[in-house]
Image: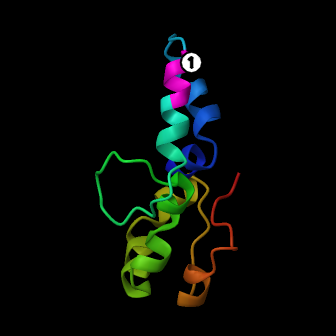
Amino acid sequence: RYEDLARDPLGHTAQMYKFVGLKFLPHLKTWVYNSTRGKGMGNHAFHTNARDALNVSQAWRWSLPYTKVSRLQKVCNDTMTLLGYHLVRSEQEQRNLSLDLLGS
């Protein structure tokens, strides 16, 4: 899941490189680290500047209205459940960033 990668960019990138049989070279580690530890919040989609990956992965929680999130959860319920996501049941849950929405 994207959020897993955002929480541990170096660890999960290393796992992906190992999975495909490639070496995760030091300059790549540095690039991943620098690209995922920036101060930006992710307001501009598809930019490659350094941003805080964890904040970017949570940006929907404060930028989307609950009505859209609720509709999306209804359409994607089966897949979200399969992937271990916890659904938000109110705008308060959506905005509460201390509430972890990822299952194991």
- Residue at screen point 63% across, 74% down: 97
- Residue at screen point 57% across, 78% down: 88
Q: Is residue 48 left or right of residue 41?
A: left
Residue 73 on image: x %, y %: 45, 72
When asked about the image quadrant of residue 99, the answer is bottom right
Residue 54 on image: x %, y %: 56, 56
Front-lying residue, 77 or 52: 52
Q: Is residue 65 left or right of residue 26?
A: left
Front-lying residue, 4 or 28: 28
User: Is residue 79 in the magenta section?
Assistant: no
* Circle 1 Cα neighbour tier, 10 Å, few/some/many (<14 / 14–19 / ≥20): few
Q: In this view, does 10 lie above or below 75?
A: above
Q: Which amino acid does label 1 sit on?
A: Pro
Front-lying residue, 71 or 40: 40
Residue 15 on image: x %, y %: 60, 25
Residue 63 on image: x %, y %: 40, 77
Report the predominant secondary structure element of the magenta stretch. Answer: helix
- Residue at screen point 43% across, 74% down: 74
Q: Residue tagged by mark 1?
A: 26
- Secondary structure at numbered mark 1: helix
Span highlighted in magenta in the image:
24-30
